[in-house]
Image (cartoon, grey):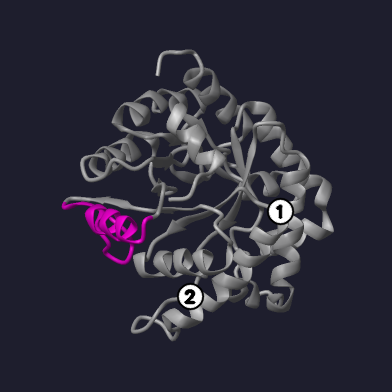
Amino acid sequence: MSPSPILDLIARRPVLFDGAIGTELMKRGLPQGHCPELWNVENPAVVRDIHRSYFEAGSDAVVTNTFGGSRLKLESYGLAARCAELNGAAAALALSVRPEGGFVGGDIGPTGKFLMPQGEYTEAEFETSFAVQARALAAAGVDFIMIQTMFDLREALCAVRAARSVAGGVPTFATMTFNRTRRGFFTLMGDSVAKCVAAFEALDVPAFGANCTLTGSDLADVIREMRSLTPRPLIAQPNAGQPGLNRAEKVVYSQGIEEFAADVPKMRAAGANVIGGCCGTDPDYIRRAAAILRAGRL
């Protein structure tokens, strides 16, 4: 592992990431079905304000508005040719509000496609798609690459290898999304926690963990299992509970701020070095988490 300021910080104290970007964009008017990454050039002030609000809430690091920014994912909007442009613009927006001592991660999410034999794509095709995105993010100056919400370990490893090949030494982190079953925690594609940890260890991923789908209480159990298998820094970014529709037919999440905050000490005690939020969390959730992490008790 090469020296990195973000890894140095993680080694010294608990680090706080940001919360959801997608739900924040929707609050600010992103139309259903519209490409979120397109707002990096269509409504840059909105995207910039979201990043600023998370830094002001206490995030040590935020991630770019590029969760669906891989070439294959953008292809579904007819925007594949603009992959480098949209990712570069996203990084510039986040970096423009990065405070002294803050960090920006280049966000890479799943392609939305499936590898053979479940789908039609090869690992080489996935790696080529991710490489275009990772190259643009690294060239724009992000501090790390954040691969997240992966439900297929093979796809996650494609993204890691792609980023490694083009990012010029920028550290690459990864998180999987798990479901709780009677047999334990597994991804949608059946990958166990132990299998994921072993694979990330084998590729020398410097920090990894889990995000999305689960609450902080469930994620604490995932992190506890991971901690029994690895000494590496672990990342936990839970949802604000489960989504549902209110009377106005708008998506809401089941956990309020205090319920979410109550899980922060659980994740930390389980071994999480990095904590943040995923779907349904906003700057107020992160502000409360920051108060807890920095109260000197964890």
Q: Was residue 194 drawn as part of the magenta stretch in this picture? A: yes
Residue at 42 percent of width and 64 percent of height:
156
Residue type at mark 2: give it.
Lys
Residue 259 visible in the snapshot: yes
Mark 1 or 2, nearer chain start: 1
Residue at which label 2 appears? 113
Tell me: 132 left or right of 224.
right
In this view, the residue in front, 168 or 200, is 168
> Judging from the image, what secondary structure is the residue with disc 1 in?
helix
Residue at which label 1 appears? 91
Residue 279 at x, y = what percent?
Answer: 52, 45
**Quarter where residue 86 is shown:** bottom right
Residue at 51 percent of width and 18 percent of height:
294
- Quadrant housing the C terminus: top left
Segment tinted magenta in the rendering: 183-204
Q: How many neighbours does mark 1 have within 10 angstroms: few (below 14), some (14-19), or many (20 or more)? A: many
